[in-house]
Amino acid sequence: LYFSAQEGILIFYHIKDLQYEIKICADISQPISNLIFSPDYTSLLLVTDQGTVYSYRPAHSGEAVKLLDTSSSCFLAADFLSPGNNYCVSVTISGEVQVWSLEDGTFLSKLNLGIEVHVT
């Protein structure tokens, strides 16, 4: 079970029978608004409400790596672009949908929907 604390800490609970173990996986020092697993469950996107997206790979037990920072554009959400784990898509309040490379955070393309977007 993965979850985030309000301070931006990614925590893992390993539960087996009646026993559990707690592990702090990453500290990104920004409140995490969404945790999204890749379709094959090898990567985890950590999305902050300030528009920063980090990648965490549970099998590698390393630190979270900053992929992109869209803090200048009223960021709402991000998710993996399936199939695969190579790209993610983000959306801004103004309705701009953006595609990013997860390998190096490169901005690839955008589409303006022409409407304001809300998350429900």
Image (cartoon, rainbow, N blue to C red):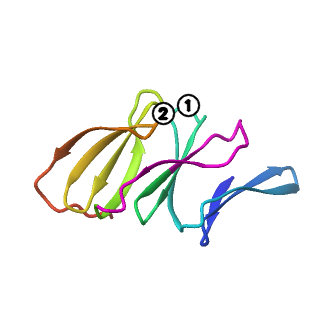
39 and 85: which one is in front? 85
Residue 59 in the magenta stretch? The answer is: yes
Q: Give the range drawn in magenta.
A: 54-72
Identity of the amino acid at label 1?
Answer: Asp
What residue does disc 1 label?
Answer: 40
Residue 108 in the magenta stretch? The answer is: no
Query: Which residue is pictured at 38% across the width and 36% down the height?
Result: 81
State the image quarter where residue 107 is shown: top left
Say which element carries label 2.
loop
The percent coordinates of residue 79 (x first, y second) are 41, 45
Query: Which residue is pictured at 60% across the width and 60% down the height?
Result: 28
Identity of the amino acid at label 2?
Answer: Glu
111 and 73: which one is in front? 73
Outermost residue, right direction?
19
The percent coordinates of residue 108 (x first, y second) are 30, 35
Binning the other alpha carbons within 10 Å of mark 2 as few (below 14), some (14 to 19) or many (20 upward) gives few
Q: How far apart are marks 2 and 1 (CA)?
A: 16 Å
